[in-house]
């Protein structure tokens, strides 16, 4: 879940080289929620691994996705009620130094938490994000990188108003 470390590193390199921003150190972690959840995940993983090893198992997985995912997936996709009852929330935690603190002298003296939350991720939030990103590209070409190439989203949209656009359309970014 969340950004791949390689994407974050590429973004940090771009921002450091092009905008002279100080790079950050990054690590991704996922909360499991207890030993019982670990046991359930291990059981499901072992069952899935066993089934995909054999063609009969793969056929069963394809034919009965609801049964093997404990109702989480179906061929029909989610219902409108399921989508309306779904949402996402990510918390990003950071520690660092204030402008006054010398990083070579002591431990980090500042903390930040950013919360990103929104509606159902796949069918609702993704189109919102895609449309707002497209509008940002069309309306803010001067804020985009000047040279061609392949950019990470963080590099491409760093100097744009994409976050403001997303906030106005139901995907909320807040610093706590």
Image (tube, rainbow, N blue to C red):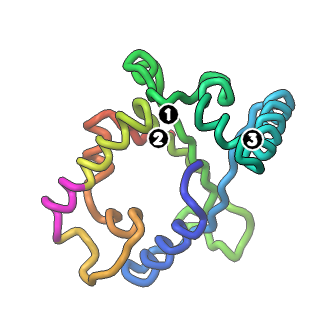
User: Relative to 7, is 149 on the left or the right?
Assistant: left
* Residue 123 drawn in magenta: no
Magenta segment, which residues? 134-141
CB under 8 Å between callouts 3 and 1? no
Q: Could you tell me which secondary element the residue under label 2 belongs to?
A: strand
**Residue at the outermost top position:** 81
Q: Could you tell me which secondary element the residue under label 3 belongs to?
A: helix
Q: Nearer the viewer, residue 2 or 19?
A: 2
User: Relative to 61, is 85 on the left or the right?
Assistant: left
Residue 116: numbered disc = 2
Residue where numbered disc 3 is placed: 48
Taking the spot 50% from the left edge, 74% from the top edge, the residue there is: 10
User: Relative to 69, is 140 on the left or the right?
Assistant: left
Q: Position of residue 85 (x, y in %)?
A: 45, 19
CB under 8 Å between callouts 3 and 2? no
Distance between the Cα atoms at labels 3 and 2? 31 Å
Dominant SS type (magenta): helix
Residue where numbered disc 1 is placed: 88
CB under 8 Å between callouts 1 and 2? yes
Relative height, residue 110 to residue 82 (above, below): below
Q: Earlier in the sequence, mark 3 or mark 2?
A: 3
């Amino acid at each position: 879940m969340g950004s791949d470390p390689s994407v974050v590193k590429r973004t940090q390199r771009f921002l450091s080289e092009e905008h002279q921003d100080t790079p950050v150190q990054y690590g991704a972690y996922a909360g499991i929620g207890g030993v019982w959840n670990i046991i359930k995940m291990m059981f499901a993983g072992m069952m899935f691994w066993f089934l995909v090893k054999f063609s009969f198992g793969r056929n069963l997985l394809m034919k009965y996705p609801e049964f093997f995912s404990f109702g989480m997936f179906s061929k029909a996709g989610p219902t409108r009620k399921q989508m309306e009852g779904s949402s996402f929330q990510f918390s990003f935690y950071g520690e660092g130094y204030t402008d006054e603190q010398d990083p070579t002298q002591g431990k980090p003296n500042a903390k930040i938490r950013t919360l990103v939350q929104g509606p159902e991720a796949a069918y609702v939030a993704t189109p919102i994000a895609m449309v707002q990103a497209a509008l940002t590209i069309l309306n803010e070409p001067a804020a985009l990188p000047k040279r061609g190439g392949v950019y990470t989203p963080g590099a491409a949209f760093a100097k744009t108003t994409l976050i403001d656009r997303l906030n106005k359309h139901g995907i909320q970014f807040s610093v706590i």
